[in-house]
Image (cartoon, rainbow, N blue to C red):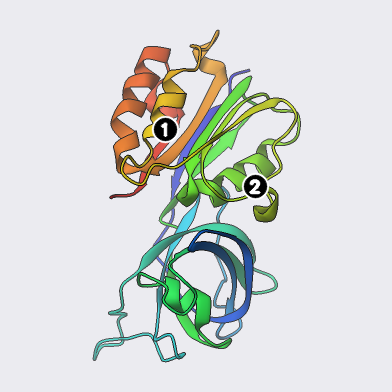
Amino acid sequence: MPYSLARHPFPPAERRLVLAERTVLARAGTDSFVRLRLVEAVPGELAGFVAPGGGDHVTVAVGSVEGGDVVVDDGGSTRAEFRTETVVDHSVDEGWIDLDVLVHGEPGAELGVIGPWAARAPLGSPAVMRGPKGSVVLSGVPGEVVLAGDDSALPAVRRYLRMLGPSITGHLLLETRFGLAALGIEPPAGLSVSILPPDPQRSSAALAEALAALRAPADPLERFVFACGEQSLVAPGRALLAAWGIDVERAVLKGYWKR
């Protein structure tokens, strides 16, 4: 029976958390992946939290890198900038959520809104989390999979691999300089793995070319496609899905960031 994708919206929620653990998983040049464990600021803060899909993500706002409070307005609403992060794992019963944050920049000079905080904020620093707004849930077992992504998609790729299980077949296309083992990505034997060197001037171009080089599926209803990277991947990705006879609603194709 062909697989199916169901999209589930969730009611909005804002949760108060604190930084409990930090682990640097891997480095590649001046970039690193840092796993953060955020725990409830008060018991029950994660009550009702669900993230059943492989690519489920939340948005996170943080305070100063020194551990200051998240900025709020006079009415108590969060004013700080939110950044999107993929859910790695969580436990509502134990009151924690793990996020893998891609940090750019040399140690001590990290870039962006959340990067310096992820790398250096003291344990106990507060954060505010919203979401997920919804979830894309895969049911059934695809006849084959195509998982393609750049560094921004690696946490979701890892989660999909865990959910799909060791018997899947197909293609894994990754545009990255990171070592997969350090990130806990262990491709099953049935996946053909291609590691594509990133080109800073043509973000996700290697992914688009590698996808276009794949053979069309024998049965479009049996090929599940997850392809996420820089925004420029979306247009050629949509054209390729159409050429393969795959409805875009039966795939996960997103621009996680824009150059």
Q: Would you place residue 146 above or below residue 214 in this image? A: below
Residue at 73% from the left image edge and 33% from the top image edge: 188
| Marks 1 and 2 close (CB-CB < 8 Å) | no
- Crowdedness of circle 1 by 10 Å Cα count: few (<14), some, many (20+)? many
Residue kind at label 2, given as amino acid type: Leu
Q: Position of residue 233 (x, y in %)?
A: 34, 35
Q: In the rendered image, which quarter is residue 89 located in?
A: bottom right
**In whole angstroms, how far apart are the C-alphas of marks 1 and 2?**
18 Å
Front-most of residues 84 and 197: 197
* Callout 1: SS: helix
Residue at 39% from the left image edge and 84% from the top image edge: 63
The furthest residue to the left: 74
* Callout 2: SS: loop
The furthest residue to the top: 218
The residue singled out by tag 1 in the image is 206
Q: Would you place residue 191 above or below residue 12 in this image? A: above
| Apparent side of residue 223 relative to residue 255 in the rendered image (left or right) | right
Front-most of residues 135 and 105: 105
Residue at 51% from the left image edge and 12% from the top image edge: 215
- Crowdedness of circle 2 by 10 Å Cα count: few (<14), some, many (20+)? some
Q: Position of residue 183 (x, y in %)?
A: 65, 54
Can residue 101 be seen here? The reply is: no
What count of labels does the image hold? 2
Residue 68: image tag: none
The residue singled out by tag 2 in the image is 180
Residue kind at label 1, given as amino acid type: Ala
Q: Position of residue 212 (x, y in %)?
A: 42, 20
Quarter holding the N terminus is top right
Residue at 35% from the left image edge and 72% from the top image edge: 113
Q: In the rendered image, which quarter is residue 205 located in?
A: top left
Q: Earlier in the sequence, mark 1 or mark 2?
A: 2
The furthest residue to the front: 29
